[in-house]
Image (cartoon, grey):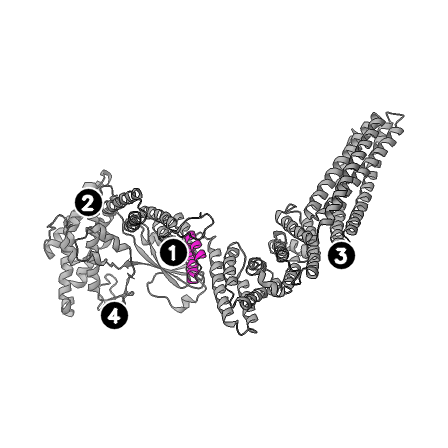
Amino acid sequence: YLSIYLSIYLSIYLSIYLSIYLSIYLSIYLYICLSVYLSIHLSSIHLSIYLSIYLYIYLSIYISVCLSIYLSIYLSIYLSIYLSIYHLYIYPSIYLSIYISVCLSIYLSFCRSVYLSIYLSIYPSICLSFCLSIYLSVCLSVCLSIYLSIYLSIYLSIYPSICLSFCLSIYLSIYLSIYLSVDLCLSVCLSVCLSIYDFLMETFLLFKDLIGKHVYPSDWVTMIMVQNRVFLRAINTYADTMNLKFLDNNSFEVQLWNNYFHLAVAFITQESLQLQHFSPTKRTTILAKYGDMRRLIGFAIRDMWYKLGMNKICFIPGMVGPILEMTLIPEEELRRATIPIFFDMMQCEHNHSGHFKKFENEIILKLDHEVEGGGGDERYMELLQSILLECAQGRPLLVTEVQHFVTLVTGLLERLLDYRTVMSDDSRNNRMSCTVNLLNFYKDINREGMYIRYLYKLRDLHLDGENYTEAAYTLLLHSKLLKWSEEQCALQLDYQTPQSQRQLKETLYDTIISYFDKGKMWEEAITLCKELADQFEMEVFDYELLGQKLNQQAKFYENIMKILRPKPDYFAVGYYGCGFPQFLRNKVFIHRGKEYERREDFQSHLMSQFPSAVRLNITTMPGDDIKNSNMQYIQCFTVQPVLEIPPRLKNKPVPDQIINFYKSNYVQRFQYSRPVRKGKVDPDNEFVVSPNVFIQMCTQTTVSPLENALETMGQTNEKILTMINQYQCDDTLPINPLSMLLNGIVDPAVMGGFAKYEKAFFTEEYTQEHPDDRDKLMRLKDLIAWQIPLLGRGISLHGKRVADDLRPFHERMEECFKQLKKKVEKEYGVRELVRTRPRERCCEMIRDQL
């Protein structure tokens, strides 16, 4: 047990410590540097191969012999002491075990060294060097040392078997000698055949593959930095050779230089060199021991680019993306050194083609991907702008075009940075606004591919919020870019399959129709169904699909007449102050509320997205002190859509279900009113102020309080009439909206009714002061009188639909209505609802008055 314990302990400790450190550092470092240096600078390939093999074999044998001797001596001594206690004639066995262990270890180490040296001379591969050196050094040194030292020592010490030892030694020697002799011949032949061009090509590809595949775990910082330092020296050595042998026009190799640039950019952008992601202590330690290798390779890339001369055009626009990725690294000195390459590219393409459109298109495409992935910041935008404009000052022919390019890229960067910021925000509205801002920018600069890409991002945001109508309108923008033709459309999306524009447009229309159906926008769905039906009937003659679309269209017509679509409210929201992002700052947006959503609920949800914002309880435009403040101010108030009836529906008996659609859709103008108080204010009744006016901001017209009262009463009566018709047509509608509307009118404690109108306008004092308003006063009284039969019809309908648990509420509402009816009929007369024709709806004559 003591012998086994000591053998295992010493073998593992010495093998791991000495083998890993010496093999990795000396074998890999010296072999790579010497092999590369000798392969490049010695004219004889044979000589460089033999020298590199010789040096590596010498070092490997020396290390292996030392390790083997130490291990064998230690193990043998411990075994001898332990076994000598029990065996008197142990010395021959000890010497035999030492001799066999040393011989086999040396032989195997020699074979391993020769094999690795020859194999690596054929394919100068750092991957093989690292992987094989580490793997074989650890595995062979540990496993073979443990095996030979423990197994052979113990086995041979206890059961001395000279025959077995000799047979094993002879077998291994013969086998390895034959194998290595054949392999050596093949290695030499292949090495001679390889040229410097092939060597560099293979090495560049190998280095790039190693950098991308992360040979070591991320927490092996020392090993990774040693590896990168070896890479850096090798790349710089290769660069000198390329300048000597492959820079002239006669010997210029585009692919070789392209591989070099891609390797250098892959090296500089690898995660292990991004010091900004490390802790300050770790960053300081790396800089002190290894320096910032990003600067060194970045400067080398810059120098190599400027040496290309007339060959630069071969790398435009292919190298725009890699160079952009390098300049986005957040290192000030590196950015200042590499950003001028962009101007050199613009100048090179301009001299070659008279413009730099290829460069511009490529940098816009790549900039979008890089910034979205986390690259770039405001400082980069400032440096890019200042450096390019400074470089253009010495080129009068390019100044105007460069200024336009800088303006374009700066605007794009601003929007991309805002977009990247809000993508992690919880506010879906902010993400939508920023996405719309960005896709409109791409539309303005005619970048159709990027425009479509962000259209689908906006579509996904709408679907996440179950805004199906908005998602349909978003896809409709894409469909408008397509034609009904068999022309193949460009693949704008990663998941898009090759298809004609007609096929893609049909697919989009089907998706859009399904979205409109979910959003209850059947009028829009019908329009698309008609267009598809026309194509199926007149162009492709697919009557089966035609029948399906006509059936779907008929279903949509039926839904319009039978299914209730609640009228949404619209809210104006202003974002004031410099605390908001650029795409929101000092701007006003119109928001469409959800079904039955109150302003208080909408405003509460809005304020939750901006906890530090201050709510403005005004409808006027705030002053410059608020707009220029560093704080956040939010203004929210209700606005009314202005109805614009289509010409085809005017002066016709159109059902309410059809008209109501246009009250909340296809809206181009909104209006809101605010009081302008002059004179003495009555706190109990704002209408008793003379002369009071309300300003409608969208039309800049001024209306009197009486005109505002007429408009309000007319809208209330129209709302009652519309809801009565909806509930008469659909028995499945919930009763709550009707209950809230009726109770808010008949119960003065809830809404105040029209008592304030009577107090303000139906007085002798007002009639004497405003004799021109006599007709308007009569019209207001008439509207009040007509409201009674409308309320009566609504309450009667409510009584038929109300549930038993709400019966007390209905009875109280009936009692309030009786008192209101008695009062109104006494003062303003009796009105009755009459149906004259089947197609007419209730109170058609009232609608004409409204």
Residue type, label 2: Gln
Of badges 2 and 4, nearer the viewer stands 2
Alpha-carbon distance for marks 2 and 1?
A: 43 Å
**Which residue bears the numbered disc 4?**
679
453 is within the stretch colored magenta: yes
Whether residue 747 is visible here, answered yes or no, is no
Alpha-carbon distance for marks 3 and 1?
A: 60 Å
**Which residue bears the numbered disc 3?**
41
Q: Which residues are magenta?
A: 429-458
Q: Earlier in the sequence, mark 3 or mark 1?
A: 3
User: Looking at this view, is 643 or 590 the one in front?
Assistant: 643
Tell me the quadrant of the picture where the C terminus can be found.
bottom left
Circle 2: is it few (<14), some (14-19), or many (20+) Cα within 10 Å?
A: few
The image position of residue 661, as x and y in percent, is 25, 52
The image position of residue 100, as x and y in percent, is 84, 33
**Which residue bears the numbered disc 2?**
728
Residue type, label 1: Leu
Of badges 3 and 2, nearer the viewer stands 3
Q: Earlier in the sequence, mark 3 or mark 2?
A: 3
**Which residue bears the numbered disc 1?**
481
